[in-house]
Amino acid sequence: IQGSVEPFPDAPFPGFGRLKLAEVCNRYQLDSAAVVQALSHKGLTIDTEKSLKEIATENNTEPHQLFEVLREVVLALKK
């Protein structure tokens, strides 16, 4: 279906951690400012031009844990 938005995945696919947060927001048509604000409220330091793996490392967490928090934020924003 042309113009349809790809749903946010339930689990990270191979290579997901190498994507920059800006790329993730673009791919899933997310408001990057809202995502950054929501993640910041959860105590994370965010730079949209860094990969999810880099963001996880800078926040002393695992990429999979960051994915879970990101997914929670995305689902809350989609409501």
Image (cartoon, grey):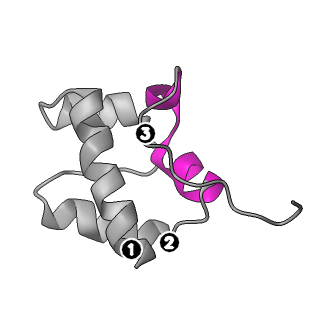
* In the image, residue 59 above or below residue 14: below
Q: Name the residue under label 2.
A: 31
* In the image, residue 10 above or below residue 26: above
Q: Name the residue under label 3.
A: 50
Residue 46 visible in the current orientation: no
Helix, strand or loop at mark 2: loop
Q: What stretch is highlighted in magenta?
A: 15-27
Image coordinates for residue 29, horizontal then vertical, percent: 61, 65
- Residue farthest along the right direction in this orientation: 2
Quarter of the image that includes the C terminus: bottom left
- Cα separation, mark 3 vs mark 2, equals 17 Å
Q: Which residue is drawn at 47% across and 66% down?
A: 32
Residue 66 visible in the current orientation: yes
Q: How many labels does the image show?
A: 3
Q: Mark 1 points at which residue?
A: 77
Q: Which residue is drawn at 28% across and 30% down?
A: 64
**Which marked residue is nearer to the observer: mark 2 or mark 1?**
1
**Which marked residue is nearer to the observer: mark 1 or mark 3?**
1
To which quarter of the image does residue 63 belong?
top left
Does the segment drawn in magenta span residue 42?
A: no
Q: In this view, does 31 lie to the left or right of 65?
A: right
Asked if the residue at tag 1 contacts the one at tag 2, i.e. Cβ–Cβ closer than 8 Å, the answer is yes
Q: Which amino acid, by three-letter code, is at mark 1? A: Leu
Helix, strand or loop at mark 3: loop
Q: Along the polypeptide, which appears first: circle 1 or circle 3?
A: 3
Q: Which amino acid, by three-letter code, is at mark 2? A: Asp
* In the image, residue 1 above or below residue 33: above
